C-alpha cells in the first residue's frame, strides 16, 4: 500500500505533467498560428477537367470568316482516319485566332455533340469540333483565353495515329435555349497574334503600328 506522502507525490507529478503539456501546447500555437481561411475568390486556379472526349465550339462572324469556316466544315465533312482528323484539327487551329466566342470542355457536357451549340447571338457561324482520344487529355481551364484554346487544338493537330480514337467536325446549329454549355466571349487580347488598342480597346494585328479603328500608335 502507498503511504499518504507517496500518493501526494504522484498527484504532484501528474499536475506538473498536465500543466507542462498545456504550456507547451500554448507556446506551439503561438509559434505556429492556425492558417487563416483563404479569402473567397483567391483560391488556387481551377485545373482544366480531363476527358477522353473533348468538344470545341468556336463562333465566327463577318462575311469572310463565315465563308472560310463553312468551306472548312465542308472540306472535312467525314473524318475517317487519324490523318484526316489531324488535317481538320490543323485547319481549326488556322481559323481559331479570329473566333469571337468559344466553349471547350468534356464532350459529356455537350450531350448533343458538336452539332448543337448554345448561343443567342445574331448572325455568325459556330464550328463544332469533337475529338476522342485513347487516353484522357486536359481540356481548357479558361475558355475566354483564346490562346489557350488554340494551344490545345495545336496539341491535338500533333497527335500520333494511336492517340486518335475518332473526330468529327461540322457546323453547329446555335440557339439560345440549346441543351449545351453557353459559348463565352474571348478576351480580345488573348487572340494569338493580336494586341489591344490602349485607347479604344479594339484588338488588331500585333505587327500593325497603328490601331485601324482610332489611329492611335501601338504601345508595343
Ligand atoms: Zn484604337
Image (tube, rainbow, N blue to C red):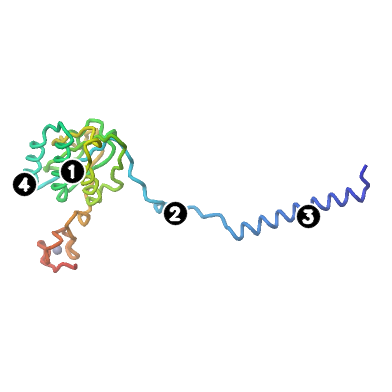
The mark nearer the N terminus, 2 or 1, is 2
Disc 3 crowd, CA 10 A, few/some/many (<14, 14-19, 20+):
few
Is residue 213 at all visible to an observer of this figure?
yes
Which quadrant of the picture is home to ligand 1?
bottom left
Label 3 residue near ligand 1, CB within 8 Å? no
Mark 2 crowdedness (10 Å alpha carbons): few <14, some 14-19, many ≥20 = few
Q: Is residue 151 left or right of residue 88?
A: right
Q: Are marks 2 and 4 in contact (CB under 8 Å)?
A: no
- Residue 179 quadrant: top left
**How far across and down, in percent of the image, does residue 180 sit?**
24, 35
Marks 2 and 3 sit apart, C-alpha to C-alpha, by 41 Å
Q: Say whether disc 2 or disc 4 marks the residue closer to the N-terminus.
A: 2
Q: Which residue in the structure is indicated by mark 2? A: 39
Secondary structure state at the residue bearing disc 4: helix
x, y (%) of residue 211? 12, 64
Q: Which mark is residue 213?
A: none
Q: Which residue is mark 3?
A: 16
State which tag comes first along the sequence, 3 or 1. 3
Identity of the residue drawn at 83% across and 53% down: 12
**Front disc: 2 or 1:** 1
Residue at point 25%, 42% (across, down):
104
**Cα distance, mark 2 to mark 1?**
34 Å
- First in sequence, mark 4 or 3: give its number: 3
Residue bearing mark 1: 58
Please tell me whether residue 51 is drawn above or below residue 28 in the rendered image.
Answer: above
Whether disc 2's CB lies below 8 Å from ligand 1 is answered: no
Give the label on residue 63, or none.
Answer: 4
Label 1 near ligand 1 (CB < 8 Å): no
Is label 1 in a helix, a strand or a loop? Answer: strand
Image position of 147 with respect to 128: above or below: below
Amino acid at each position: 500500500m502507498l503511504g499518504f506522502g507517496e500518493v501526494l507525490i504522484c498527484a504532484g507529478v501528474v499536475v506538473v505533467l498536465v500543466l507542462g503539456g498545456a504550456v507547451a501546447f500554448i507556446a506551439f500555437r503561438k509559434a505556429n498560428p492556425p492558417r487563416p481561411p483563404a479569402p473567397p475568390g483567391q483560391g488556387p486556379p481551377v485545373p482544366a477537367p480531363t476527358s477522353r472526349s473533348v468538344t470545341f465550339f468556336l463562333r465566327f462572324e463577318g462575311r469572310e470568316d463565315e465563308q472560310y469556316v463553312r468551306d472548312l466544315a465542308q472540306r472535312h465533312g467525314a473524318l475517317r482516319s487519324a490523318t484526316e482528323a489531324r488535317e481538320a484539327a490543323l485547319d481549326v487551329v488556322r481559323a481559331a485566332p479570329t473566333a469571337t466566342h468559344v466553349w471547350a470542355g468534356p464532350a459529356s457536357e455537350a450531350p448533343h455533340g458538336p452539332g448543337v451549340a448554345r448561343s443567342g447571338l445574331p448572325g455568325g457561324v459556330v464550328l463544332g469540333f469533337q475529338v476522342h482520344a485513347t487516353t484522357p487529355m486536359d481540356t481548357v481551364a479558361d475558355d475566354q483565353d483564346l490562346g489557350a484554346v488554340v494551344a490545345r487544338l495545336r496539341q491535338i493537330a500533333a497527335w500520333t495515329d494511336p492517340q486518335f480514337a475518332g473526330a468529327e467536325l461540322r457546323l453547329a446549329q446555335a440557339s439560345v435555349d440549346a441543351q449545351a454549355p453557353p459559348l463565352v466571349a474571348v478576351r480580345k487580347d488573348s487572340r494569338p497574334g493580336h494586341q489591344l488598342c490602349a485607347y479604344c480597346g479594339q484588338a488588331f494585328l500585333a505587327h500593325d503600328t497603328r490601331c485601324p479603328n482610332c489611329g492611335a500608335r501601338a504601345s508595343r
